[in-house]
Image (cartoon, rainbow, N blue to C red):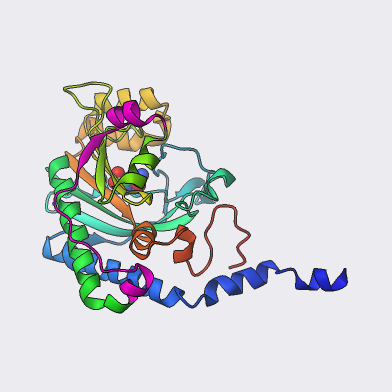
């Protein structure tokens, strides 16, 4: 009885085991390679890097519920960043700034039901980018080019690691297929995203998701949306979400009412939309750990972390 108790791994054992995994440094080199190549690509394409913010009176309301994370400072609540979507739009009010990107830590305190999806961490990094005066076609092509650029770099820089972790070098893709949510849902049923991802051999785009108010509604087809998700193949699922943005005051308010966003929280954002007008922008953001997971063909995205960030994990550090 006593020896059984002694033999049971403690949380400390599990924590040490997680950070001592032999494959971890190689996975981290892949992740570092992704970030290094991305910086280079962004510089070549003329995007300006912004430093991330972790606290703001407003943050992304997100499409799904998470545990609320605010802290009190200077007599008001500050939210931990869930994404820098609004800061991307607002920064582009600067007339000289045409496009930007941020290596952006996001805190999303997912509920326990997302612990075993293999795709969620309660804290992760996304590389978020936004362009003034560009549309969805531009952003989708930009992302396709970025992925090929990163993959070619990793093949050149880390071939042995890729062969060991992935079993082969990374591909160069032609144009990615494009699907619409409503068509896939009709063909595959409610689990269409997972099923299509499992069957796919190349990344694809999934258009038209009904979600946060800032993704633009298609004026030509109200009730549909000018947004796009990158879906990784082989069952790895969503890897980027992005959209053309709502930027007109009345339309933003309509969309806020549609999805039940509290206007009071966004008072100053709405004031700017009404008085100055928000710029017309489009962009997206990809999860760094999820891209690393796809490249290394890891079962769970938490295999990318040094300190587990699995939702509801009893993390010690
Ligand atoms: N980064 C995403 C975008 O640009 C938003 C998000 O992370 N929820 O649309």
Residue 244, given in percent of the width and then of the height, sits at: 21, 38
The quadrant in which the C terminus is found is: bottom right
Q: Is residue 179 magenta?
A: yes
Q: Is residue 249 magenta?
A: no
Residue 110, given in percent of the width and then of the height, sits at: 52, 47
Q: Residue at x 17, y 56 (%)?
A: 173
Q: Nearer the viewer, residue 267 or 143?
A: 143
Residue 224, given in percent of the width and then of the height, sits at: 26, 26
Residue 254, given in percent of the width and then of the height, sits at: 31, 22
The quadrant in which the N terminus is found is: bottom right
Q: Residue at x 60, y 63 (%)?
A: 315
> From what the image shows, is residue 149 above or below residue 274?
below
Observer able to see residue 135: no
- Please give left or right for residue 100 compared with residue 53 in the image: left
Q: Quadrant of ligand 1?
A: top left
Observer able to see residue 7: yes
Q: How many marks?
A: 0
> From what the image shows, is residue 134 above or below residue 26?
above
Q: Residue at x 36, y 63 (%)?
A: 292
- Please give left or right for residue 91 compared with residue 9 in the image: left
Looking at this rendering, what residue extends furthest in the right direction?
A: 1
Q: Quadrant of residue 126?
A: bottom left
- Please give left or right for residue 173 compared with residue 4 in the image: left
Task: Give the extent of the magenta segment.
Answer: 161-190
């Amino acid at each position: 009885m006593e020896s059984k108790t002694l033999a049971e791994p403690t949380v400390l054992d599990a924590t040490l085991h997680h950070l001592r995994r032999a494959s971890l440094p190689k996975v981290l080199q892949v992740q570092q390679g992704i970030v290094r190549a991305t910086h280079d690509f962004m510089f070549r394409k003329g995007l300006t890097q912004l430093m991330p913010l972790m606290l703001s009176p407003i943050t992304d309301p997100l499409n799904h519920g998470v545990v609320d994370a605010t802290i009190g400072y200077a007599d008001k609540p500050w939210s931990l960043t869930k994404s820098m979507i609004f800061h991307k739009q607002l920064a582009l009010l600067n007339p000289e700034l045409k496009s930007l990107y941020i290596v952006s830590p996001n805190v999303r305190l997912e509920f326990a039901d997302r612990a075993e999806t293999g795709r969620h961490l309660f804290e992760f990094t996304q590389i978020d980018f936004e362009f003034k005066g560009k549309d969805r076609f531009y952003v989708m092509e930009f992302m396709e080019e970025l992925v090929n650029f990163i993959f070619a770099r990793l093949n050149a820089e880390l071939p042995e690691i890729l062969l060991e972790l992935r079993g082969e070098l990374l591909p160069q893709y032609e144009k990615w297929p494009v699907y619409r949510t409503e068509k896939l849902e009709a063909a595959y049923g409610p689990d269409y995203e997972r099923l299509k991802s499992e069957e796919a051999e190349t990344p694809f785009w999934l258009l038209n998701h009904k979600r946060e108010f800032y993704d633009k509604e298609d004026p030509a087809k109200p009730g549909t949306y000018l947004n796009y998700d990158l879906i990784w193949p082989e069952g790895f699922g969503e890897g980027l979400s992005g959209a053309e943005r709502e930027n007109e005051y009345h339309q933003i308010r309509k969309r806020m009412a549609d999805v039940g966003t509290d206007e009071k929280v966004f008072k100053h954002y709405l004031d700017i939309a009404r008085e100055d007008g928000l710029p017309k922008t489009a962009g997206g953001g990809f999860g760094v750990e999820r891209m690393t997971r796809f490249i290394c063909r890891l079962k769970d995205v938490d295999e990318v972390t040094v300190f587990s960030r699995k939702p509801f994990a009893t993390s010690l550090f």
